[in-house]
């Protein structure tokens, strides 16, 4: 077929995969039969195919629990099928759990609940975590077996898990306000303020994170709680100051026990508006 | 992939570990729904396992990214809120070996090359790839003449190709 320069732009859009179906069919027919346009298409298509790499950053919301659950489902299906028959494997796959509510970044904090529970040998009755994902159920079941190691430990664990459950309930409560920060969010809920991190790097050795509050209209900061994430980078911290008259929250890296005034540059300062 | 063709589940596991975040990221970006993205991710990897011959050669990440995009377009179609003509077509031709030029490129170098594109070219390309919309819809959303959108896509892809070739040559 004779080469047609006027199709050059359309060939690029076809290579990207953004041409309407009817037009795509016509341009594709030309590309099939015109060597020059086919070479142009192939060159642009191989570049366009790489654009997908940009989306890898969007997977930052994929928490480890969900990632592990997908992998477990897939590997079960793969090992069960052992054959290149898609239908066999697909029958083995469970769809993502539907909890009847829209996904939110705080889903990652379910992993934190399980991690805290493991550390404290309890929270077997954490219904939310249990319903949110099967992996945590397994971990909690294992945890339950280990939970006979003393009444004092169990009581402490229960208190900690109850506190964490209240914090998670506040995070997901209707009407709660969420303010994005690096690695997590600040949540204002029912007069309470929580810092909820899913991906917080460990502080430098010998240091902790410290929260700071800034009252509305004020310029100075007031010291608040110190904290550190767990091994997976999760942390949920409630600020004892509450939301009343609170204008902004900041976090710095400080010595253990905290400081009276910040001694390092804030990792973030978030206005609550 | 050769080991997957021989039904090696450990090889499949390694592929999953290396690419599931890319697949999930594309699915999430296109579908805007974490649970649908999870389902789509599992479906794509099952396709890898059940039809490994679908991948011939070239950059595996680019291939699985395109597979994911096409699956996501199918999901968008099945949502049935759009008429068919509102969604783009993705026409692939068999037999092209051109992708092998970029076979060893990793995500970091691709992102660096994309970052060098003028913002209006990069924006049009990203909308076309991830938006699941046609160039006509891109023009409407960005209040840009249709011909300008097409020209930006072409100029951007050509520039991206040149950047990537320079990266490969280094």
Image (tube, coloured by chain):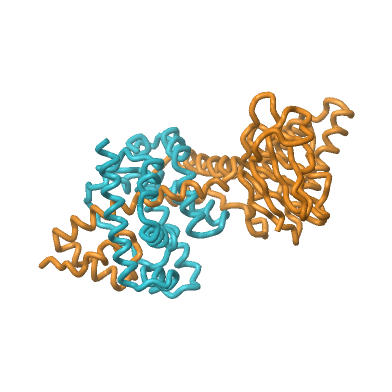
Chain colours: A orange, B cyan
Instruction: Tell me residue B109's x, y (percent).
Output: 37, 41
Q: Quadrant of the C terminus of chain B?
A: top left
- The mark tally for this picture is 0
Residue farthest front in this picture: A219
Instruction: Tell me residue B100's x, y (percent).
Output: 25, 43
Instruction: Tell me residue A84's x, y (percent).
Output: 38, 45
At x 79%, y 45%, the residue is: A165
Instruction: Tell me residue B101's x, y (percent).
Output: 25, 42
Q: Nearer the viewer, residue B120 or A89?
A: B120
Q: Quadrant of the N terminus of chain B?
A: top left
Is residue A34 found left or right of B3 in the rendered image? Answer: left
At x 36%, y 59%, the residue is: B121
Q: Nearer the viewer, residue B121 or A101?
A: B121
Q: Nearer the viewer, residue A86 or A119?
A: A119
Asked if residue B64 is positioned above or below residue A174 in the image, the reply reads above
Q: Nearer the viewer, residue B86 or A6?
A: A6
Answer yes or no: is residue B70 visible.
no
Asked if residue A114 is positioned above or below residue A105 in the image, the reply reads above
Which of the 4 quarters of the picture holds residue A263? Answer: top right
Answer yes or no: is residue A213 visible.
yes
At x 81%, y 55%, the residue is: A245
């Amino acid at each position: 077929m004779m080469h047609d320069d006027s199709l050059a732009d359309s060939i690029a859009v076809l290579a990207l995969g953004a041409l309407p179906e009817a037009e795509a069919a016509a341009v594709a027919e030309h590309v099939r039969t015109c060597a020059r346009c086919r070479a142009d298409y192939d060159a642009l298509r191989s570049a366009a195919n790489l654009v997908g790499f940009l989306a890898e950053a969007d997977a930052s919301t994929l928490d480890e629990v969900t990632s592990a659950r997908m992998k477990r489902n897939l590997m079960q299906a793969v090992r069960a099928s052992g054959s290149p028959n898609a239908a066999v494997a697909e029958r083995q796959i469970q769809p993502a759990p539907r909890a009847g509510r829209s996904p939110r970044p705080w889903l990652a904090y379910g992993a934190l609940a399980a991690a805290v529970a493991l550390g404290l040998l309890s929270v077997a009755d954490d219904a939310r975590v249990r319903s949110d994902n099967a992996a945590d159920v397994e971990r909690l079941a294992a945890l339950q077996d280990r939970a006979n190691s003393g009444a004092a430990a169990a009581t402490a664990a229960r208190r900690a898990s109850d506190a964490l459950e209240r914090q998670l309930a506040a995070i997901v409560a209707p009407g709660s306000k969420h303010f994005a920060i690096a690695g997590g969010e600040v949540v204002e809920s029912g007069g309470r303020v929580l810092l909820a991190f899913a991906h917080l790097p460990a502080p430098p050795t010998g240091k902790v994170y410290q929260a700071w509050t800034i009252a509305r209209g004020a310029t100075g900061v007031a010291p608040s709680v110190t904290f550190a994430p767990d091994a997976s980078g999760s942390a949920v911290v409630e600020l004892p100051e509450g939301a009343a008259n609170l204008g902004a929250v900041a976090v710095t890296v400080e010595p253990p026990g905290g400081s009276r005034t910040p001694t390092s540059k804030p990792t973030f300062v978030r206005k609550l508006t | 992939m050769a080991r997957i063709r021989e039904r090696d589940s450990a090889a499949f596991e390694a592929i999953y570990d290396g690419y599931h975040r890319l697949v999930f990221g594309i699915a999430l970006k296109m579908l805007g729904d974490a649970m649908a993205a999870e389902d789509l991710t599992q479906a794509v990897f099952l396709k890898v396992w059940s039809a490994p011959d679908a991948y011939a050669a070239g950059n595996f990440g680019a291939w699985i990214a395109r597979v994911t995009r096409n699956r996501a377009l199918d999901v968008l179609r099945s949502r049935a809120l759009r008429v068919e003509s509102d969604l783009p077509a993705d026409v692939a031709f068999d037999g092209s070996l051109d992708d092998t030029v970029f076979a060893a490129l990793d995500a970091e170098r691709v992102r660096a090359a994309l970052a060098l594109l003028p913002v209006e070219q990069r924006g049009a390309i990203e909308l076309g790839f991830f938006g699941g919309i046609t160039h006509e819809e891109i023009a409407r959303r960005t209040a840009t003449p249709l011909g300008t959108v097409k020209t930006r896509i072409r100029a951007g892809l050509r520039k991206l190709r040149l950047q990537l070739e320079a990266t490969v040559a280094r």
